Image (spheres, grey):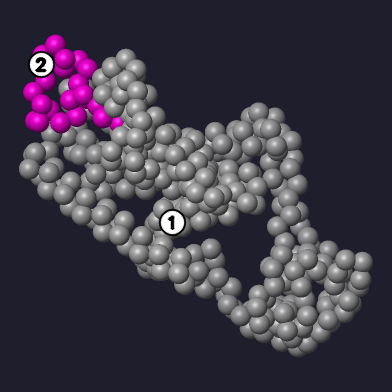
Amino acid sequence: MNTIFAFILVLGLLIFVHEFGHFIFAKLFGVRVLKFSLGFGPKVVGKVIGETEYVISAFPLGGYVKMFGENPDEQQVPGEDRKVSFAHKPVWQRFLIVLAGPLFNLLFSVVLFFMVFTFVGIPTSVDTTRIGNVNENSPAAVGGMQQGDAIVKIDNKETTTWMDVLEAVKNSQGKPVNVSVLRGDELLTLEIVPAIDVVKNIFGEEVEKRYMIGIMKADEFTFEKTHVFGALQSACLQTWMYISLTAMGFVKIIQQVIPASELGGPILIAQVAGQQMEKGWLNLIYFIGLLSVNLGLLNLLPIPVLDGGHLAFLIIEGVRRKPMNERAQIVAQQVGIGLLGTLMVFVFYNDIVRLFS
């Protein structure tokens, strides 16, 4: 139940933010908005306010803002209505209306982190020698180490930072080391035999090989209060880090560093959202921030049907001083729909395989 609630909360919120960006800029430039829909397909509930129908639709995997005059070739726009028609607005205004959706997703991440850093504080990692995880069948597991143990000495040399632990193991050259750990109130000395292992980065690429014992540091944080400008700066830096990681992730997928089997869709999002909610609302906020950045950048990809594809058409129109050939746009959109449909089927397949395996 947590998973379903978290999924609806996370995806619904991010879709609303995205479509609200299109909506607010359309209104700003005087475009008549006919419909604001959260979801696709049959209408579940709706209400007309002013000139806009606000709708919640059956399939919550997206949303849309329908604007008057979006398809001028299908609907002849009378002269008196051209001032509220999307297609008859200057290129730069249409560009900003389309860009606003992804941009609002990126800005929403900044807003989320700004609120957390303002009211809770900026999380600062505590340098500790406490073990957060022991890999199965690793030298540490074989030697009797457990999650929660605090390493106080290695070969009678005090360890006060995690770097002390890494250096002592690395310099062992594979010889057995005596590790003193504090487990509760009990001090234990364990013999561990380090083994050569591969160090990988966040994308799974091999960085180096060195002696390791198969443990990870516990994540421990303190929250430092800061002023408003400090919170804003940290929120921008946090969002920029997510933007950089997401963009690099796209590159690594193209380079096949990240296997296609790692791609996930709605089912994976629901699972992770549920897990983060169980860990606490702060974890969930960080996940929403990351997902908002992913959604924003994904929509900026120059694929027809996505916002990035529309932006590409508008850039071409701006350079040529006239719209692209109608037939070329239709073909490009059909290709885009095919690509997007194939991707959706593929990520659903990955999700189902992951679910049952």
265 in relation to 131, above or below: above
Does dot 1 land on a helix, a strand or a loop? helix
Q: Nearer the viewer, mark 2 or mark 1?
A: 1
Q: Position of residue 335 (x, y in %)?
A: 17, 52
Residue at coordinates 52% horizontally, 73% vertically from top-left?
206
Q: Position of residue 275 (x, y in %)?
A: 58, 55
Q: Give the residues in magenta.
A: 65-86
Q: Which residue is mark 2?
A: 78
Q: Position of residue 246 (x, y in %)?
A: 45, 52
The answer to whether residue 333 is visible is: yes
Residue at coordinates 64% horizontally, 37% vertically from top-left?
116
Q: Nearer the viewer, residue 60 or 295?
A: 60
Q: Nearer the viewer, residue 328 or 65?
A: 65
Q: Which amino acid, mark 1?
A: Ile
Q: Going by the image, does 123 lie left or right of 88?
A: right
Residue at coordinates 53% horizontally, 46% vertically from top-left?
6
Q: Position of residue 72 (x, y in %)?
A: 12, 28
Does dot 2 land on a helix, a strand or a loop? loop
Q: Which residue is mark 1?
A: 267
Q: Which amino acid, mark 2?
A: Pro
Mark found first going from the N terminus, 2 or 1: 2
